[in-house]
Image (cartoon, grey):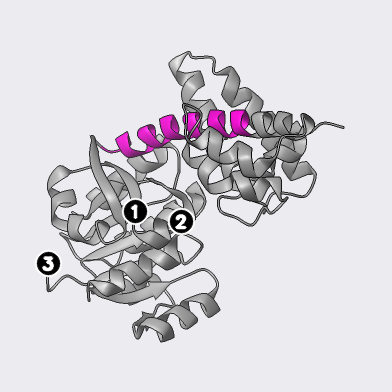
Amino acid sequence: MNKMKVGLIGLGAMGAPMARHIHTTGLLIAVGNRTQAKADAMAAELSVRAARSAANFADCDLVVLCVSLDADVLENVAALAEVLKPGAVVIDHSTVAVETARRCAAMLGAHNIAFLDAPVSGGVEGARNGKLSVMVGGNSEALDNVRPVIESYAARVTHMGASGAGQAAKAVNQVLVAGINEAVSEGLALGEKLGLNPDKLLPTLLAGAASNWFLEKRGATMLRDEFTPGFKCAHMLKDLRIVQSIARDCGLRLPTVEQALADYAELIEHGQGEADTSALITLKRGG
């Protein structure tokens, strides 16, 4: 563990704090990002290497990915497969399709490199505070070898099963998240219409059965029309389309997911793709 060399690719709202947590272990040696200026700035901050290509990760025992889209994951994995040494591990914290995770595992497996699909839950706050919940698919021995690195930014790390199981668990997570977001937005919109004092309403709700993460972290800000992400509407729509495909393959109809898909698509049409998902309340307020 003390000799492990770790690289990280993807320095967005989640990846940047992850890099800082890994740095505290003394194992981080390189960071990369599609926008080179971000990589250069983070590398300077942490006194590590700013990668300019996959080749700059060739000496890493572990590379952590935290990017946005399936295509981004596949592109990075294809490049890393050509440069990492046998026995290395790639962890992907992105939310992608189950089949994408399995393709990545096969691509890297051909070079004797382990791949762990490990999507996270807990939002930007969880990443900053090192309290993420990580759901992992892939080889359990590979996970055990890199678990101390993941635990630098996670409160819980769970091996869910074979490749793709982490993404399957994240799909379930996003069904619940979408439903909770819908309910909280509708409830608080109703509270506004009824003229209830939010300074009294919110703590009352949080003390009872209605309490949840979204209400606690976003309730006050959404009532003030503050929608700084957080988790962007565009990313939620992307995740829910993955869930929709999985549900269709399973023969399930998920009405809450269909409603959330329609709502986030509408928000994006209104130019709020970069806003936090709590902007959903703007739709629920009606006219």
Instruction: Tell me the kind of residue under disc 3.
Output: Met
Of the pair 70 and 230, the residue shown nearer to us = 230
**Residue 181 relative to residue 44: left or right:** right
Residue 75, position as x, y percentages in the image:
45, 57
Of the pair 284 and 62, the residue shown nearer to us = 284
Residue 80, position as x, y percentages in the image:
33, 63
Determine which of the numbered discs, if any, sits on residue 247 in the image: none
Element on which disc 3 rests: loop
Work out whether 128 lies above or below 59. above
**Residue 215 relative to residue 221: left or right:** left
Mark 2 vs mark 1: which is more N-terminal?
2
**Residue 60 relative to residue 216: left or right:** left
Range drawn in magenta: 163-184
Of the pair 205 and 74, the residue shown nearer to us = 205
Element on which disc 2 rests: helix
Give the CA distance from mark 3 to mark 2: 27 Å
**Contact? badges 3 and 2 (CB < 8 Å):** no
Residue, disc 1: 131
Instruction: Tell me the kind of residue under disc 2.
Output: Glu
Residue, disc 3: 1
Residue 122, position as x, y percentages in the image:
42, 48
In the image, which is nearer the foreground, mark 3 or mark 2? Answer: 2
**Contact? badges 1 and 3 (CB < 8 Å):** no
Determine which of the numbered discs, if any, sits on residue 125 in the image: 2
**Residue 249 relative to residue 82: left or right:** right
Residue found at x 48% / y 34%: 211
**Contact? badges 2 and 1 (CB < 8 Å):** yes
How many neighbours does mark 2 have within 10 angstroms: few (below 14), some (14-19), or many (20 or more)? some
Residue 34 visible (yes or no): yes
Residue 185, position as x, y percentages in the image:
65, 34
Mark 1 vs mark 3: which is more N-terminal?
3
Element on which disc 1 rests: loop
